[in-house]
Image (cartoon, grey):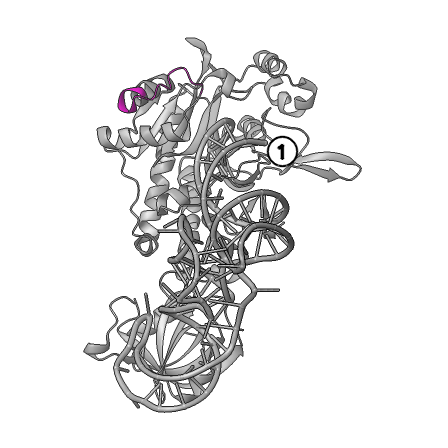
RNA sequence: GGUCCCGUGGUGCAGUCUGGCCUAGCACGCUUCCUUGUCAAGGAAGAGAUCACGGGUUCAAAUCCCGUCGGGACCGCCA
């Protein structure tokens, strides 16, 4: 008999069906045993006889039975399938599960982070953990759809790269035959080259950072949602675009992830269009006025400043999203375009959401000579950037772009306290699948 | 790289400050039994811990001190 999915069973009252999935939970009343079966569409209650007593949580089973409407008193309003149940006539065990290292049958998965990650194949099966990655899928997908809708072309960036792309940041070296190469810390140079090909481009790719950062918001490998566009009329086109993409992501989550948000009692960030836009200096004045902490003249916002600014933006403008612009040249990479009015500042921005950087971007230098001069000024050898520089030698339009950290957006949307929860198999200084 | 906090059955915690009443407690899970309407099912009984490891102080250490290892949080840096 053809397989019916759990959610489809509600449309088959009175019919005989076959279901397949995992035993999510068992409630044993002796001669009457309830099994919660879970498949990719959700949970459904099976009503079984004594033969179900042998089943363990996470056994994989196929059952045959009849879909019955539940009596008024027995309806479970918390389950989408809660108005029906399946009276089982036959159980086949497709695979047995060993005893679980922790209880996975409760609404809250009550384990600490190291346990959560040490048992990733199992913990990922918990509905609340699954939900994180449904949301992440929606984020990545709506990033794609939004940009495709704006005539952007998706491309695949390489991960093995010849040299350090952004100066100071730490990279992972790889042995490359008898030579040395690196894992890319960003698709930056390639997406700029691709602007010379398709004008408006984006990529969903992995970025690798070997920075010795042990915090709740850093990963050694993360998903970077990168885009770049040519023929800017004004650099603020980028802020408009970042805003559109962010709203597209919110829409994608809203349309596809209501249940997932509910599991975390999460709401999408509040925002006002346009998102408030503050120059770094203005933001620092605000921090000073609001908290008395004098950060004026610092070259960047500290994590504490970012939280304070977001709090201010929420209070003052009802927006949990806020742009910070015009970071100093000294804090930005060689390709950042200087502000013509104030060359010690760049046409660059961060988008903060709920107290954390989600997005970084800006206009880039598109003139060959200026770029070569800057590479030298940053202490690099233009020879190492020969391929990249070709694009500029042969004509590049004014352009710019930004990168969104997919795990950070996921984390901040759901209110997770550690970014590792928002990464399927997180890599950090002490972990590559297992603790190293 | 720097600062701070924490290591107690399979999991999550209490007990540590103020050493002795700890023969280490609770919840979940697990085992056996009972249970025909549960959906975090319920009831009864039971197994399971050299209190991270090593050293020290003391009549006495899960508890105080030192070291090692492991984990977590924050800063710098960044998405």
Q: Secondary structure at mark 1?
A: loop
Q: Mark 1 packing: few (<14 Cα in 10 Å), some, or many (20+)?
A: many
> Predominant secondary structure in magenta?
loop
Say which residue appears at 64% left-offset and 21% top-offset: A390
Q: Tell me which segment is drawn in magenta.
A: A288-299
Q: Position of residue A38 (x, y in %)?
A: 41, 69
Foreground pick, A10 / A105: A105
Q: Nearer the viewer, residue A415 or A72?
A: A415
Is residue A217 in sight in this rendering? no
Q: Residue furthest top?
A: A341
Q: Is residue A329 left or right of residue A175?
A: left
What residue is shown at x 66% (from left), y 25% (from top)? A387
Quadrant of res A288: top left
* Circle 1 chain: A
Residue A8 is left or right of residue A90, and the answer is: left
Residue A430: within the magenta?
A: no
């Amino acid at each position: 008999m053809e397989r019916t999915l759990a959610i489809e069973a509600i449309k088959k009252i009175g019919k005989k069906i076959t279901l397949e999935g995992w035993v999510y939970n068992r409630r044993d009343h002796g001669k009457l045993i309830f099994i919660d079966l879970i498949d990719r569409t959700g949970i459904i209650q099976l009503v079984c006889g004594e033969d179900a007593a042998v089943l363990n949580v996470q056994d994989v089973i196929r059952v045959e039975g009849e879909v019955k409407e539940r009596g008024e008193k027995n309806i479970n309003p918390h389950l989408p399938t809660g108005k029906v149940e399946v009276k089982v006539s036959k159980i086949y065990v497709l695979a047995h599960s060993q005893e679980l290292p922790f209880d996975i049958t409760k609404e809250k998965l009550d384990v600490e982070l190291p346990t959560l990650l040490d048992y990733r194949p199992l913990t990922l099966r918990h509905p609340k953990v699954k939900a994180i990655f449904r949301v992440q899928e929606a984020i990545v997908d709506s990033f794609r759809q939004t940009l495709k809708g704006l005539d952007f072309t998706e491309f695949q960036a390489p991960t093995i790269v010849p040299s350090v792309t952004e100066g100071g940041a730490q990279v992972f070296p790889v042995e490359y035959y008898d030579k040395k190469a690196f894992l890319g810390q960003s698709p930056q140079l390639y997406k700029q080259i691709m602007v010379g090909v398709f004008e408006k481009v984006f990529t969903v790719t992995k970025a690798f950072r070997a920075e010795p950062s042990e915090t709740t918001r850093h990963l050694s490998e993360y998903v970077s949602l990168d885009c770049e566009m040519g023929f800017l009329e004004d650099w603020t086109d980028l802020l408009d675009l970042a805003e559109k993409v962010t709203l597209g992501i919110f829409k994608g989550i809203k349309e596809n992830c209501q249940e997932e948000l509910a599991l975390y009692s999460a709401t999408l960030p509040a925002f006002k269009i346009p998102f408030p836009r503050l120059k770094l200096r203005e933001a620092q004045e605000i921090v000073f006025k609001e908290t008395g902490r004098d950060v004026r003249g610092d070259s960047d916002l500290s994590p504490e400043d970012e939280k304070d600014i977001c709090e201010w933006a929420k209070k003052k403008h009802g927006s949990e999203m806020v742009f910070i612009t015009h970071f100093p040249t000294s804090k930005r990479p060689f390709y950042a375009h200087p502000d013509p009015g104030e060359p010690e500042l760049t046409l660059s921005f961060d988008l903060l959401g709920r107290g954390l950087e989600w997005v970084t971007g800006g206009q880039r230098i598109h003139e060959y000579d200026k770029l070569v001069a800057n590479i030298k000024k940053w202490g690099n050898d233009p020879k190492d950037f020969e391929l990249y520089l070709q694009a500029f030698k042969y004509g590049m339009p004014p352009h710019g772009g930004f990168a969104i950290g997919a795990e950070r957006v996921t984390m901040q949307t759901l209110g997770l306290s550690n970014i590792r929860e928002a990464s399927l198999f997180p890599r950090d200084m002490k972990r590559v699948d297992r603790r190293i």
